[in-house]
Image: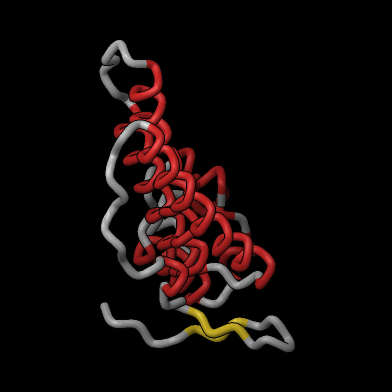
Amino acid sequence: MSSLTRRFAAPTAATLAIVCVLGTAVIAPAQLLSELGPDICRAPASEVAAEASFLAENEAAMKKMMTDMAVNPTGDVDADFVAMMVPHHQGAIDMAVAVLRYGRNPQLRRLAQEIIVTQQQEIAAMGLAVGQALPPSQPSPVQVPSVRQIDSKSGQATDLATEP
C-alpha cells in the first residue's frame, strides 16, 4: 500500500472498496490495480477500508505537523525550539491515535499508548521550561475507541460497527 499512498494522495475507502469488489480496470485505472497487487482483493473489504482510513488520517496528521513546525524565528532559540517541537510531538500523538483506532497488533497498540503519554509529558515539560502554563487537563487519547475489537488470546481483530 505504500506505493499507493505515494502516487495517490489520501486514497479513500470507497475507491479501494470499489476496486476490490468489482476488481475491474473500468472502475479504477489499471495502474492503480497493478500497484495494489492481487492480494489487496483477497483482503476483507473492512480491512481495506480501515487501511485507507488509517492512511488518510496519518497523512493529515503529517501535513498538519509539517505546517505547524514552520515557525518564524523569534531570536529566542529556546522558544523557537519549543515552537517547532510541540507540533512534532503532537504529530506523533496524532499518528499513535490513528494506530489505536485502526491497528490490531497488541504490541504496536501498547507502544502507541506509550508514545501518547510520553509525548504529552514532553510537550508539557517543554512549555514549562519556557515559562508557559500547563495546558488544560483533558481526557487521554489512549482511550480512543478502536474500530476493531482485539481478542486478547488470539490477537485476531473483529471489526466493530462504527457511526458514519
Residue visible at 43% across and 74% down? Answer: 143
Between 65 and 154, the one lying in front of the other is 65
The quarter of the picture where residue 73 lies is top left
Looking at the image, is 136 positioned above or below residue 92? below
What residue appears at the point 41 percent right and 72 percent down from the top-left corner? 144
Q: Is residue 27 above or below residue 90?
A: below
Question: What residue is shown at x 60% (from left), y 72% (from top)?
Answer: 104
> How far from the left and from the top, in percent, is residue 149?
53, 85
Tell me where residue 28 sits by quadrant: bottom left
Quadrant where the C terminus sits is bottom left
How many numbered marks, from 0 up? 0
Q: Is residue 16 above or below residue 70?
A: below
* Left or right of residue 43, residue 143 in this image: left
Q: In the shown orientation, is residue 35 left or right of residue 59?
A: right
**Picture quadrant of residue 105:** bottom right
- Residue 43 lies, with reference to residue 155, above or below; the image says above
Image point (29%, 39%), residue name: 132
**How are the colours assigned in the image?**
secondary structure
Q: Seen from this angle, which residue lies furthest top?
A: 75
Q: Position of residue 162 (x, y in %)?
A: 35, 82
User: Horizontal and vertical percent for residue 27?
Assistant: 37, 60
